[in-house]
Amino acid sequence: MTDCTIVIAGSAGEGIQTIGDVLADALSAHGYAVFTWQEYESRIRGGQNTYTIRVREDPCNAPTWEADILLCLNKGAYEKSSDRLKDGGILLAEEPYGEGALVIPFKAMAKEELGRVIYANTIAAGALAGVLGMERDALEKVLDREFAAKGPDVAEANRKAARLGYDAAGAACREACPWSFPRRGGSHYLVAGNEALPMGAVRAGCRFIAAYPMTPSTGVITFLAKRSEELGIFCEQAEDEIAAVNMALGASFAGARAMTTTSGGGFALMVEGISLSGMTEVPVVIVLAQRPGPATGLPTRTAQGDLLFAVHAGHGEFPKAVLAPADPKDAFHKMVRAFNLADRFQIPVIVMSDQFLADSRFTVPDFQVDASRPESFLADPKDFSAYKRYALTGRRLAPPRPRREPPPGDRRQRRARPVGAHHGGPGRNGPRHGGKKASQGGASAPGHGASRSLPHGGRPGDLLFLGIVPGRGPGSRGPAPGRRRARGHAPLDRTVASCRRDLPGGGPALGGGKQRHGPAGFPPSHGPGSDHGPTDPSQRRAAPHRPIHQEGLP
Amino acid sequence: MNVPDPFKNDVEVQWCPGCPNFGILTALKGAFRDLRLEPHQVCLVSGIGQAAKLPHYLQCNFFNGLHGRALPVALGIHAANPTLTTVVTTGEGDCYGEGGNHLLHALRRNPDITVVVHNNEIYALTKGQGSPTTPVGEVRSLQVHGVEAAPLNMPAVAVLHDAAFVARGFAGDPDHLKDLLAEAVRCPGLSLVEVIQPCITWVRRPVSWYKERLWPVPPGYDPGDKDAALRVLAGDDGRFVTGILYRGPKRPLFGERFRRETGDEPLVRRGFPPKSSISALLDNFRMGE
C-alpha cells in the first residue's frame, strides 16, 4: 500500500505554499487521498516553515513526521528539517546540502530557460512530480487553473517550467525513486477546516459575519469576504473583537443569522458579548480557533487548551452550546448545527477549531450536504397580536422570535417589542447586578430579578456539551478497552485514531497530555511549536522557584 | 386635535425627577413624529448609563446592551435591516469613554445612523466621577484634587473625519433639539448630535448657568465650511456652541456597495440559500474525474 510523505521546507515568502498546493492538488486530482499540514511562524518573510503532504490510496487524514521526500529551498531549511528524512529517502535541493542529494538548480534553470527566477517554484513542483513518478503532464491542469487569471503566456511558461523540473528529476533519480503515481479514477474533496467552516455557515443561512483578523481563525471570514456579493453575506472587519461580537449580535437581533470568528485573546475580549447573548437570548455563533499559551499565545501553532474556557465563558449563568468538529466534513455539518441550535435555544454557540483543523487539507470522499439543513425556529407573526418576547411562559423555551421576515421593522410587529436586557440599574426592588426582563421590556420590572435571567427555565449550571467526547467522533475508533484513553477533543481525536491504526499492532495508547501543541504521536521536541521547547505538559519542567529568602537579604 | 402619541409607553421612568433627560426624550419623540415615523420603523440602541435608559421609555424596537457597545450593535442592526431608522442614545461616558474606539471607526464607516450623545460632563449613574468631557480642575468624587486630564472634543473629531452631520443642542430647549434630531435622522450617513444635558443631582449648577453659556451659531454660518466648524468648536472656551455645526461632503455609506451589488432586499428577508449555492461552492474543492 502506498503511503508517501513529501516535506517542502523553506522560508516564508519563498513559495512553499504554492509548491505544496500545486502538488497536493495534482495528486488529489489524480485520485489519491492527500492530507497536508503546515507549520509556520508568525512572520511574512524569512524563518523556516514546512508544508507536508501525505499521499495514500485510501484517506488517512493524519500527519506523518518522517519524510520519504524532502525538498529544501535553502540551507537553513535543510538544517532544520533534514532529520525528518527517512533512511533511504530522497533529498531534493537547489545545492548539495546533504549527502546523496538530488541537486536541481531550480533558480538557475528558471533564469536560463525561462528568463525569470519566479518560475523556480514551478520547476521544483515539477521535479517533485518527477520524483514521485507521476505522469509528465500531471501538473498541467492544476497550473492552468492556478495561473488562468494571469494570461496564457504565464500559464504556458509555468507548464514549461513544470516539464523542465520533471525531466531534470527523472534524469537524476531513475533508480533511486521507487514511487509511481499513475492516474486513478474517482473523485473526492480536498478541503481545509477554514474552508469547510464557512461553507457550513453558508449552508446554515448565515447572512452576516464580523471579525477581527486573528490567526488561525482569519481564513473563515476571508473565505466569505471573497464571495460576499455572490453569496449575499455581509462581511465586516471590526475594529476589535468586542465590536465584532456586538455587531453579530446586532445583526442577529434584527433577524439575520450572524457569526464571528476569533482566537484566544480575541475570544477573551468577546466574553462580555457572549454573556450579552445569553442575557438577551439573541443567538450568535462564534468560531474559536484556539492557539497555545496565555495572553497573545503562539499564533501559528496548534493547541486545544481553551475548551473549558469556552464552556465557561461569560459571567452570570446562562446556557450555551460548545461544539468541536473532528474534521472538515464534520466542521461543515457542525456549523449548520451550531446555527440551528443557536436559533432554537436562543443562545450563543461556540464552535471549536485550532490551527491543525483550520489549515490542514483533508481528503473527504463525500460531504453528504443533505445530512444538514438550516432549520427555522421562528414564530409566525399571525400567531400573536401582542408579541411578548420575554414572557414568562413556564415552558423551557422563551417565546420564539418572530419569523424572519418581520423582526424589527415590520408593521405586523407594531406592538411587538424585542427588548434588550437591563443591567442592574437603580431598581428599587430588583437585585443590583441581576439582569431584569419584563415580558414587553421596560427597565423597571420589580419582581423579575436575576432568577429570570436564566432563560428557558434552565437551572444554574445547565450546559450543553456536544461532540467533545474523545474517541467518539463520527467514524473514529475509540480507544481499546483497558487502554489509557487518548486525549484531545474532536479534531485531534481523528488524528489519534488514525495514528493508532497505523502503528504496529494498533500501537500503544497515545496521549496523556490534555493540552498538546502538536498532532498526537509526534516527538514532543519536534512537533509544531518545537522551537518553543517541549510542548507536552507532562514533559515540561516548572521553572525552579525563586527562594523566598535570598542570600544577602534579611 | 388630540392625537395619541404612538411612541408613548407606560414604563416607569427611572431618571431623577426634573432631569433634563426628560427634555431629550420629549425632543426625540417629537422628531420621530415630525418625520412621520411609526414605532415599528424605529430601532433605538443603547449601552449603559442614564442616557442608555432612554429607549425603555419609548414605544419602539430597541436593544439595550453593554456599556460602550451600542454603536457596533447598531451597525449590525443597520447592516441586517437598513430600512429601520436606527438611533443610538448614549452618554459621553458610554460613547466617548468606554466605547470611544467604536465612535472613531463609525466615523470612518459612515453608516446611516444617528448618534445622540447626552453630555452631562459627569458619570451620573455611578454617582459623580469625572467623565471624558469634565473640564480640567473640576472636583469630582474620584478626582479629589480636580480633573487633570483634558476633556475630549468629539464633535470636533467628527468634523475632522467628515461626519455627515454634526450638531449640538441643549436639553433645556426641546423644541430646538427636536428639529436638530429630525434633521440628523433625515441626513444620510453618520449624524452626531451632542446634547448639553445639565446634571441636576451631581453637578448642581442652576440651569441658568448653562443658558448663559449657550452660544448659537451666528446667522449666516455655513455648516458646509469645515474650517469654520473646526474654529467654532476649537474656540469653545467655556461656551457651548449650538446648532447645526457641520454637514460633511457626500461619502459612500456603510453597506452601500454591498446593497448595490446584491440588491436592496434587507438581509433579514433573504431567507436560506438554495442547496445549489452550497453545491457550487463545494465544487471548487472537488478533485479528480
Image: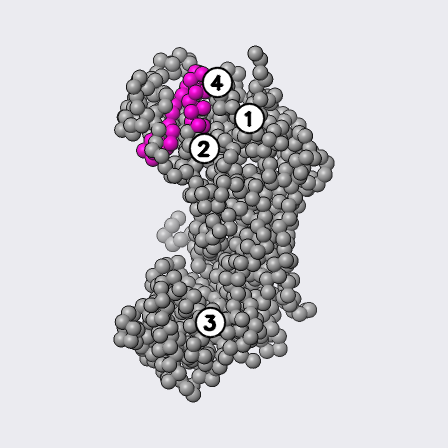
Q: Give the Cα distance between marks 2 and 4.
A: 21 Å
In percent of the image, x 63 and y 40: which residue is there?
Answer: A403
Q: Circle 3 sits in a helix, a strand or a loop, which is it?
A: helix
Q: Nearer the viewer, mark 4 or mark 3?
A: 3
Amino acid on which the number 2 mark rests in the picture: Ile
Q: Amino acid at mark 4?
A: Gly
Query: In the rendered structure, which amino acid carries the disc numbered 1?
Result: Glu
* Tag 3 and tag 1 share a subunit: no
* x and y, in percent, of residue A192 in the image: 51, 62
Q: CA distance from mark 4 to mark 3?
A: 70 Å
Question: Which residue is identified by label 1?
Answer: B38
Q: Which is nearer the eye, A468 or B79?
A: B79
Disc 2 crowd, CA 10 A, few/some/many (<14, 14-19, 20+)? many
To which quarter of the image does residue A496 belong?
bottom right
Label 3: which residue?
Answer: A26
Q: Choose the circle earlier in sequence order: 2 or 4.
A: 4
Q: Is residue A386 above or below residue A3?
A: above
> Horizontal placement of B48 versus A509: left or right?
left
Q: What label does residue B23 carry, if any?
A: 4
Q: CA distance from mark 1 to mark 2?
A: 17 Å
Observer-side mark, 2 or 4, equals 2
Q: Nearer the N terminus, badge 1 or badge 2?
A: 1
Pick whichever, A265 or B153, lies toward us: B153
Residue positioned 62% across, 77% down in the render: A505
